[in-house]
Amino acid sequence: MFNAITRATMYFFNTNSSGRILNRFSKDMGAIDEMLPIALMDCIQIGLTLLGIIIVVGIVNIYLMIPTFIVGIIFYKLRVFYLSTSRSVKRLEGFIILT
């Protein structure tokens, strides 16, 4: 939304009051403020659950830790590949929208 405001024409600012624009930004920030703690708690919960599962697997059968670490490394490499590809696609998408 910030990018859209910075690229807006003067007609937009003449037809919309500054209070209306600021109100919209504050609503968006309020929505982020409500969603961020929930997402953070979910992330912490999933991380601790994963850590607990790995500890239990290590206690029950230590030999299962070898495939667990191998799969973890594979998932990490897939994550790095996905993030770089996703950034490239978003960059191309932004370029296509601008032209």
Image (cartoon, grey):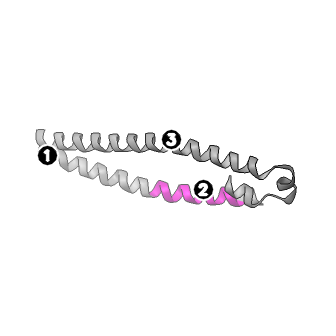
Sequence-earlier tag: 2 or 1: 1
Q: Residue at x 65, y 59 (%)?
A: 92
> Circle 2 — which element?
helix
Q: Residue 21: percent from the left, percent from the top?
A: 73, 50
Residue 87 in magenta stretch: yes
Q: Are marks 1 and 3 in contact (CB under 8 Å)?
A: no
The residue that label 1 is drawn on is 63
From the viewer's side, name the closer residue of 34 and 23. Answer: 23
From the viewer's side, name the closer residue of 37 and 95. Answer: 37
Quadrant location of the C terminus in the rendered image: bottom right
The residue that label 2 is drawn on is 89
Q: Is residue 56 left or right of residue 15?
A: left
The residue that label 3 is drawn on is 35
Q: Amino acid at mark 1?
A: Tyr
Cα distance in 3D space between marks 1 and 3: 40 Å
Q: Residue at x 48, y 54 (%)?
A: 82
Sequence-earlier tag: 1 or 3: 3
Q: Amino acid at mark 3?
A: Met
Residue 89 in magenta stretch: yes
> Circle 3 — which element?
helix
